[in-house]
Amino acid sequence: MPGGPALSDPQRQLQQPDSTRGVLFRIAPGLEAFSRYEIAWLRSDLAAGLSVAAVALPVGIAYSDLAGVPAVIGIYAAIFPLFAYALFGSSRQLMTGPDAATCIMVAAILGPLAGGDTERYQGLMVVLTLCAGLIYVVAGTARLGFIANFLSLPILTGFLNGIALLIIAGQLPKLLGYSSEAGDFFPKLIEFVNKVDESHVPTVMLGFGLLAGLVALRRFAPRLPNPLVIVILGIALVVGLGLDAKGVALLGSVPAGLPPAFHLPDLDFAQTKTILRDAIALVLVSFTSGILTAKSFAQRNRYEINANQELIGFGAANIASGLAQGFPVTGADSRTAVNNAMGGKSQLVGIVAGGAMLLILFFLTEPLAYVPIAALAAVIIVSAAGLFDFSTLREIGSISRYELAFSVGTTLGVLILGVLPGVMLAVVLSLVMLLAIESKPTDAVLGRVPDMKGFHSRRDYPEAETTPGLLVYRFNANLVFFNVDHFKERVMAAITASPTPVEWVVIDASPINVVDVTAVKQFDEMKGQLAARGIVLAVARRKRTLERFFEAKWGKRRIQLVQDDNFDTLKAAVRAFNRRGERG
């Protein structure tokens, strides 16, 4: 019988699946973590939280420019998602917030829909953020965490490299102080070449000075909140040297306090469908990127995260951002790295960071008016340069030129076609890679190797001995509609290449985990063709789990029809072949 002490123990409560507390802990893992919080962690968590805030605030302001919204909205997106993720996420280190790739996708999605109307743009942004949050939650509830693996590493690397180059090209006018009208990557480069002599000299000197300072700080003082240092230095230079009077562009006033009430814009069916479609693409990219950050830091700290719970955590973060009029967010690698470097131990770090930024939003927004745009451009360019993963690209090239071509092709697709078509290209290329591999898998004719157990590929072991008249063949993939023709061609080719006339073909089905209707029909057709030539087609080592793909009644009839040509082992099939004269 449970007693009083057991009811006060949160871990014992978790073991009672029907308890209210246990349900709450499963829905919101942060609550369970806080119930076991150790006071010894407090000092580290406070230091890490303040350090994260020092990085997250200027980054949020800078990334608001990428998203095409006022700076205060970037601050909202930096603050409120941290509170939600601290409750619903499963990572102890991950910090959520604005992300360069996500922000540039937001601008690409909303620009055509808003038609130049700033108020409508911001309203659509709230709708997009809330839609993304709801998609995350639905996906997490449906246990779709495996979508994190949908974009392969080469494809994701190529996509993010393309985004990085787009961002850098877009910040050049702000770093150099010339006007820009070009929209796409290559026109921006041409514009840069044509207008570089129109650059504003004070802006150039300030921008490149701050850029060099930021690079140096990242190299020699990585533990400092480098973006904050550069922004403060930029403010000091503007005020001290009167750079605003010399034409250096500034951020301008930032409203203090909580977000005002918002109104959702009217949307027709076509616009709603467009936003939902694009929100799905945004979720796919941002979750794939964010979960990589969460997994990386979880591995460093020797614990596991739950991908399905991360979907819910990201969903809660985006819903919080949307309700606060922020834009979509994801796992932020730079802020997570700061948390980890400062020794953050729990989700309290996110709450401390959000609280610190909230205090600044209430009481210290006036100095933000003097932030030079060039300083924000420097922060964005350095962040984008970090997004370009040349080391992974080089590693991919050393492993597989084939996959390197896919990665580079994705980058070029983003640069030429744009961000959203680039997402679709990334998805298509991922499918093409999968189909290219699975449509023509490896196969083998098997034989017995002296002094070795089992049957082995004759390609690997040329000395493997075969039984005259018997062809044992293995197809190293699932058997489905897009590769069954290749399967048939390879079996027929193996029969033709056999040194002795083939009487039996035995398929080693051990690698086959999935079979579809097309494959069944094609297999039966090939069985009939071989039977007409006097050749028996048999199957060995078939997995019984294949039955789950078919209706039970059909499966039972099928087993009865083919039971004479189905064997549990290859040895059993060989024995049957040797006794073939006894078959009725």
Image (cartoon, rainbow, N blue to C red):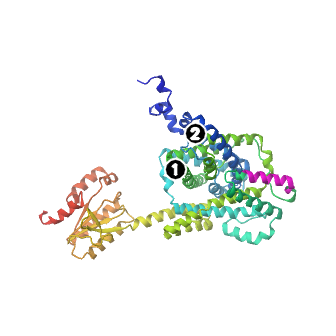
Could you tell me if the residues under marks 2 and 1 are in contact, i.e. CB atoms within 8 Å? no
Q: Which residues are magenta?
A: 228-243
Q: Check disc 2 and give the amino acid type.
A: Leu
Residue matched to label 2: 87
Check residue 236 for magenta coloring.
Answer: yes
Secondary structure beneath dot 1 equals helix
Residue matched to label 1: 299
- Quadrant of the image for the N terminus? top left
Residue 312 as seen in the image, left or right of residue 163: left
**Vertical order, 435 against 298 (above or below):** below
Write down the quadrant of residue 234 in the picture: bottom right
Secondary structure beneath dot 2 equals helix
Which residue sits at x=18%, y=65%? 577
- Depth check, front residue: 350 or 221: 221
- Depth check, front residue: 211 or 220: 220
Query: Residues under labels 2 and 1: Cα distance?
Result: 21 Å
Residue 424 as seen in the image, left or right of residue 260: left
Write down the quadrant of residue 474 in the picture: bottom left
* Residue 216 percent coordinates (x, y): 71, 59
- How packed mark 2 is, by other alpha carbons closer than 10 Å (few <14, some 14-19, many 20 or more), is many
**Magenta span: helix, strand or loop, mainly?**
helix
